[in-house]
Amino acid sequence: MYHGNSIKLLAGNSHPELAQAIAERLNIPLTPCTVKKFSNGEINVKVGESVRDEDVFILQTGSADVNDNMMELLILISACKTASARRITAVIPCYPYARQDKKERSRAPITAKLIANMLAVAGCDHVITIDLHASQIQGFFDFPVDNLYSEPHMIAFIKREIPGWKNSIIVSPDAGGAKRVTAIADKLGVEFALIHRTKDPKLQNAPERCQILVGDVRGKVAILVDDMLDTGATAVSAAQSLQENGAAEVYVLISHGLFGSMDAATLADWPIAKMIVTNSNPQVENVKKAGGKLAIMDISPTLAESIRRTHNGESISLLFGEWAVGLGQY
């Protein structure tokens, strides 16, 4: 346990709203720091107060300008390391390059491992993240990684905001998400379904077709759960398939709403009642564009509590047991 030192929470430019929300929950001020660019694009960092022998947490997420955000984080870590911080924890709600976690073909990079190496070289001692795209990314690090889950928030949202959830079915848009949806379905006491995506191998650039492989959605509220939304192609195709197969309503729950090449305004044309994403990435502008079809699950309580427990040397696993039950998450 760390005694005689305090939490210092710093933030880059990726998500100031989330950083402020975490600071308010911890009842501490954000440590002043300035992150600017020189005219040639180089990043300049200035930490406004001493972090010597302090427990430093740096919040930076892998949102829109992912490469600039990553460099900001690395330079902030290095600045705190050379300023004699006792421990440096990178709080990365949405881990960058998480989809590049293995070699899909010859001569392909494993960039998620490269990111882990860069964090280690910069001086990071610990990482806190949420819903890694692949759990094995934790093995890329030689220091502790706490992979938190948005599952308690999703369960709480379903119970609180989705009418008729007891007649719902939890759906994964691919086989890779089967473990996630079965866990949520078990806790809610409902059924689950899996969607199989196929392409015509004879046609180049053939569109994907979705086919329900497991489960019956007819007459039920279909709740589609996935960890990431970038172009939106998979989610909208799955939603259309669920509607065609007789689902009464379709909701989409996403851990990380990247909205890379997708305009949130197009949600008005989707065959869904609502899409729900966490605020692991900034969503204020997307909510404005979506015309009431986009809702936000706030993950700042989970991140704030994980920071407090890390600082005090307490168990993180309780975030998904007693602590979640106490907040009415389950």
Image (spheres, rainbow, N blue to C red):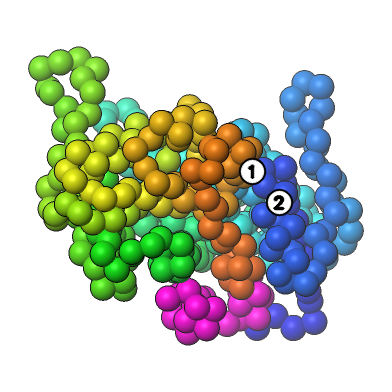
The residue drawn where x is 70% and y is 60% is: 21
In the picture, residue 13 is in which quadrant? top right
The residue drawn where x is 33% and y is 64% is: 164
The residue drawn where x is 64% and y is 49% is: 60
Residue flagged by tag 2: what amino acid is it?
A: Glu
Q: In which quarter of the image is the C terminus?
A: bottom left
Image position, residue 288 (x, y; %): 62, 38
Which residue in the structure is indicated by mark 1?
284
Select label 2 or label 1 by which is in front.
1
The reply to whether discs 2 and 1 touch (Cβ–Cβ < 8 Å) is yes
Image position, residue 280 (x, y; %): 56, 51
One can see residue 199 in this view: yes
The residue drawn where x is 37% and y is 57% is: 135
10 Å crowding of disc 1: few (<14), some (14-19), many (20+) = few
In this view, which residue lies farthest toward the top? 204
**Of residues 200 and 160, the one drawn nearer to the viewer in this rendering:** 160
Q: What stretch is highlighted in magenta?
A: 307-330
Left or right relative to 306: residue 28: right
One can see residue 115 in this view: no
